[in-house]
Amino acid sequence: MTPEMKAFGGRRVSGARKVSVRAAANIAFVKYWGAREVAAGLPFNSSISMTLSRCTSHCTAEFDPEADRDEVYEAGERGELRPPPAGWTAPVLAHLDRIRRWAGVQGAFRIATRNSFPAGAGLASSASGFAALTVAAAGATARDADPADLSDLARQSGSGSAARSVLGGYVEWPADLGEVEAGRAPARRLHGPRHWDLRDVVALVETGPKAVSSREGHERVPTSPYFEARLALLPARLDGARRAVENKDFDALRTVLEEEAVDLHFLAMTARPPFFYWTPATLEVVGAVRDLGASGVDAAWTMDAGANVHVICSASAERPVVERLRTLSGVRSLIRDRVGPGPVETDDHLL
Ligand code: PMV
């Protein structure tokens, strides 16, 4: 049994009808940015990420072979069930259909989900959401699955980075052309969470939904005249990321993180039409983290498709990072996260 299987129970779920799972967001060191097929979550390039532990989605899936209509809810703070946010129901229903076909079962799901962090703000809430949904709903159908099956299934949700959140620790999602063309592209684990105790202090400078979704970003960035140039740089950069993580070499990791964050936003700014996520507060955080790095603190910044800044740092650097970020006027709040184990099954049911 692999460590991931243990993390989310690793059991045959035969007979079980209700499964609850917490899955965490992940932060990409090398980004998935630009899709061959956005609806299927098929990437142009391989990506490497760290699965987090505190920014989680909690999902309960109940499967009833006698029912004939899926129901999807968002669970509120006091356990009340309400309609999910706009834009969430249709992709969830489509994904439940996919899971039913994959499991070869008939019947219907009841789903309830809750996030521990703001959705739609560039914090990969769709990655944790679809990872939790996939593992819980697949578990509720009682079909046996290994982590690669679940990762590939999560990827098909259209939130490709969910493929990485199905695994814990340090994860690579290879864009092997043969596999991608054959329609299969699961992520795989590079190292477990105990390999390197990295922290992610997220500086929230915006909590509202972003103007351009990552889905739209994936469609638009291949129009940048610099898209091919980034692809050409990636084999060496991926190698650098793998080696930096393997050797726990923070300076080497910093180079990859910052180059990738700049390229992600540079491609956005040079797409046709261009789009922008940075705000003045983003630059305030980036400047402060660069100062910390120059003074010998193991801290580096990266970003996803949004204005918020993820400050990746060593365990001993977390305190100076937090103290510095708290002094910045543009930072509304901080989320202190760290590398985590991957999806975990829980008895805390939302339904
Ligand atoms: O998985 P998606 O379709 O939400 O895309 C994620 C894209 C980025 O967050 C910008 C980069 C990444 O690899 O996580």
Image (tube, rainbow, N blue to C red):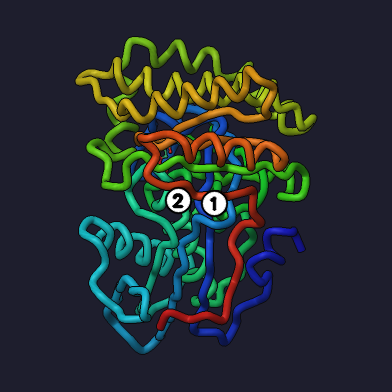
Q: Position of residue 15 (x, y in %)?
A: 57, 87
Which of the two residues, 331 or 73, is positioned nearer the viewer here? 331
Q: Secondary structure at mark 1?
A: helix
**Circle 1 residue:** 165
Q: Secondary structure at mark 2?
A: helix
Q: Is mark 2 within 8 Å of ligand 1?
A: yes
Inspect the image, locate mark 2, and give the three-letter code of the amino acid beneath it: Ala
Q: Mark 1–mark 2 contact, CB under 8 Å?
A: yes
302 on left or right of 83: right
Residue at (47, 36) in percent of width and height: 327
Inspect the image, locate mark 1, and give the three-letter code of the amino acid beneath it: Ser
Q: Position of residue 199 (x, y in %)?
A: 63, 43
What's the mark number on residue 291? none
Q: Position of residue 193 (x, y in %)?
A: 71, 50
Which quadrant: the N terminus?
bottom right
Return the disc, 1 or 2, that comes first in the chain's sequence. 2
Asked which quadrant contains residue 76, the reply is bottom left
346 on left or right of 60: right
Residue at (59, 44) in percent of width and height: 187
User: Dot 2: few (<14), some (14–19), or many (≥20) neighbours within 10 Å?
Assistant: many
Q: Is residue 329 above or below residue 26?
A: above
Residue at (62, 49) in percent of width and height: 338
Which of the two residues, 315 or 150, is positioned nearer the viewer here? 315
Q: Is residue 174 visible?
A: no
**Circle 2 residue:** 127
